[in-house]
Amino acid sequence: MRLCHTILGLIATLVLSLPATAEVELTPLAGYRMGGEFDVNNRADNEDRRVDLEDTVSQGLLLNVDLSEPGKQLEFYLGRQETTARSSEGFLTPTRTSVDLTITQLQFGGLYFPGGTTTGGFVSGVAGVTRLDPKPSGLDTHHRASLSLGGGYKWPLNDHLRLRLDLRGLYTVLDSGGAVFCSGGCNVRFESNGFFQVEASAGLAVRF
């Protein structure tokens, strides 16, 4: 909850600090996120296990600001997914084969419109941090670098509303050999360098 309050505070500060002439778009997103798998190693038995992230719905918020150069926008991306990390065998304990997981991305970057406007087709690129927050509480939370690349389309509905469709790929870096979610004396370690997900989403952009 504190992280959400901090993020909303940063958005408000950014919006208030913009020049009065800057055009700003705020877009709540709803989507579906697929993929995401990584390997772990249990040093107790030296066995490697594959962990898969369940495909689930996702939510997000986009903040875009027009830049002085035509066809370019600054972009702030906040994405969130409630999912479950599953393995065919126990990976935190011999009997635990799944862990509920909240994945949150906080990333900055930009949009580029080949047509030189702020509607139509675009490509996007943002980078920042991913927070991996397992449940129940007491398990370790991890923050890792991440990158998102994608594209989409914006349809102008009127002067202040735009329908936005996105397809993005999200890559989160994992430190191979670093501890997994368990805390204190855990023998389970990441064996992957990262995991990749694909997200399709839609939203209604409000321009002001």
Image (spheres, grey):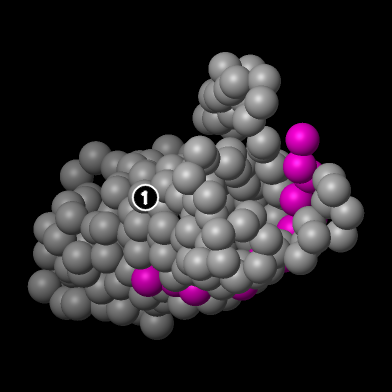
State the image coordinates of residue 101 (x, y, percent, origin top left): 50, 56
Is 144 left or right of 14, judged from the image as shown? Answer: left
Q: Taken as a whole, is the magenta stretch helix, strand or loop?
A: strand
Q: What is the quadrant of the N terminus in the image?
A: top right
> Residue 55 lies in what quarter of the image?
bottom right
In terms of image quadrants, where is residue 155?
bottom right
Q: Most extreme residue toward the bottom, as rendered?
A: 88
Residue 140 in picture, x, y percent from top left: 35, 42
Looking at the image, which is closer to me, 141 or 67? 67
Residue identifier under label 1 = 127
Which residue does the image show at 71% across and 48% down from the upper left? Answer: 27
Depicted 161 relative to depicted 65: above or below: below
Q: Amino acid at mark 1?
A: Ala
Q: Give residue 74's position: percent from left, percent from top.
A: 50, 43
Q: Nearer the viewer, residue 139 or 22?
A: 22
**Residue at position x 51%, y 67% in the image:** 114
Side (left or right) of 63 relative to 130 = right
Please tell me how many numbered marks the rendered image carries. 1
Residue at image position (60%, 20%) is 19
Q: Is residue 113 left or right of residue 196?
A: right
Q: Quadrant of the C terminus?
A: top right
Q: Which residues are magenta?
A: 196-208
Q: Where does the image place residue 204, in percent across and percent down from the top left?
A: 79, 55
Q: Is residue 13 visible?
A: no
Q: Quadrant of residue 22?
A: top right
In the figure, 54 relative to 119: above or below?
below
Q: Within 10 Å of the Cα at label 1, are there few (<14), some (14-19), or many (20+) other Cα atoms?
A: many
Q: Can see residue 147?
A: yes
